[in-house]
Image (spheres, grey):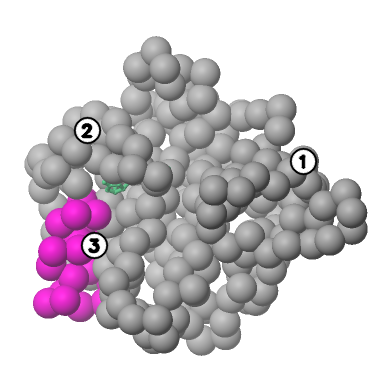
């Protein structure tokens, strides 16, 4: 991971660029930019990516897996980030399933996993990672939801060290995942989860479900239990933790 490394001063979106070059790039190609002019978040949202204040990067992966397994790679990235944040800042962070990293109740990183392929086999996956490292202020509408590592640690954080740590961890967990399967990192996902045990509201395929998050499935899904005793494995969609 990151051995083929492309660096940009400014780019529209590292995910968009990664998708453009993915077919001709080796597995693990990593694209990093100092600034994104049209950074994207999930659900078509915008992702604010200030110059030199964060880590805006995308990793091109070509694993031999099915599209339904993409959520597992989001989890691989998430556990890598939690470890990297602890190693470089000493901050404790949690995964809000499936793709947010939360520090002290606010979002510090987001992951946007996109893919290209057929029903049974993917051509490539792009894992986009956005980390608010040294962002010192956010637009008003984000202020009570978003934070940065420097705000939470009350000091400037070395972006290079954090990037290196993230890529090292990613390489290790990605290998483990490919060699042994998702179950080998599932326990870490559970340990780092902010969502488990909480009451959640899930919006999937335009339907709303309210229940309690009880487990991470061996396919990377979030298992939600409902009052009537029924359980459902959520594989994608929007999950909010009630009271957060
Ligand atoms: C989210 O939380 O909604 C996901 C945010 C993902 C942001 C990253 S920054 C690098 C990559 N390029 C993009 O345009 N988005 C992702």
Q: Is residue 27 above or below residue 130?
A: below
Q: Which residue is drawn at the image coordinates 12% and 44% (left, top)? A: 11
Residue 68: x, y in percent? 49, 73
Secondary structure found at label 1: strand
The quadrant in which residue 150 appears is top left
Figure quadrant of the N terminus: bottom left
Q: Is residue 41 above or below residue 115?
A: above
**Residue that numbered label 2 is attached to:** 52
Q: Is residue 230 above or below residue 210?
A: below
- The answer to whether residue 74 is seen in the rendering is yes
**Residue that numbered label 3 is attached to:** 30
Assess disc 3: are there few (<14), some (14-19) or many (≥20) residues with their C-alpha within 10 Å of its C-alpha.
Answer: many
The segment highlighted magenta reads 14-32
Secondary structure found at label 2: loop
Q: Quick one: 58 or 83, which is closer to the camera?
A: 58
Q: Which mark is residue 73?
A: none
Q: Quick one: 213 or 129, which is closer to the camera?
A: 213
Q: CA distance from mark 3 to mark 2?
A: 17 Å
> Mark 2 CB in 8 Å range of ligand 1?
no
Assess disc 1: are there few (<14), some (14-19) or many (≥20) residues with their C-alpha within 10 Å of its C-alpha.
Answer: some
- The answer to whether residue 195 is seen in the rendering is no
Left or right of 226 on screen, residue 151: left
> Mark 1 CB in 8 Å range of ligand 1?
no
């Amino acid at each position: 991971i990151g051995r083929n490394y492309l660096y940009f001063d400014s780019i529209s979106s590292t995910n968009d660029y990664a998708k453009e070059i993915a077919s001709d790039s080796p597995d693990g190609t990593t694209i990093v930019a100092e600034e994104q002019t049209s950074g994207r978040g999930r659900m078509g949202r915008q992702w604010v990516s200030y110059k030199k204040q964060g880590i805006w990067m995308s990793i091109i992966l070509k694993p031999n897996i099915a599209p339904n397994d993409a959520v597992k790679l989001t989890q691989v990235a998430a556990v890598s980030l939690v470890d990297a944040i602890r190693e470089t800042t000493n901050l404790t962070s949690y995964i809000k399933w499936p793709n947010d990293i939360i520090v002290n109740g606010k979002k510090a990183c987001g992951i946007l996993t996109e893919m290209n392929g057929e029903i049974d086999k993917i051509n490539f996956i792009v894992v986009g990672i956005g980390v608010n490292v040294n962002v010192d202020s956010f637009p008003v509408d984000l202020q009570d939801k978003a934070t940065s590592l420097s705000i939470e640690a009350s000091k400037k954080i070395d972006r290079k060290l954090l990037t290196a740590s993230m890529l090292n961890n990613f390489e290790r967990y990605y290998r483990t995942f490919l060699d042994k399967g998702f179950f080998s990192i599932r326990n870490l996902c559970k340990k780092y989860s902010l969502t488990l045990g909480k009451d959640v509201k899930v919006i999937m395929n335009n339907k709303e479900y309210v229940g309690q998050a009880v487990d991470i499935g061996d396919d990377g899904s979030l298992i939600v239990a409902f009052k009537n005793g029924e359980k459902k494995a959520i594989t994608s969609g929007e999950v909010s933790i009630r009271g957060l």
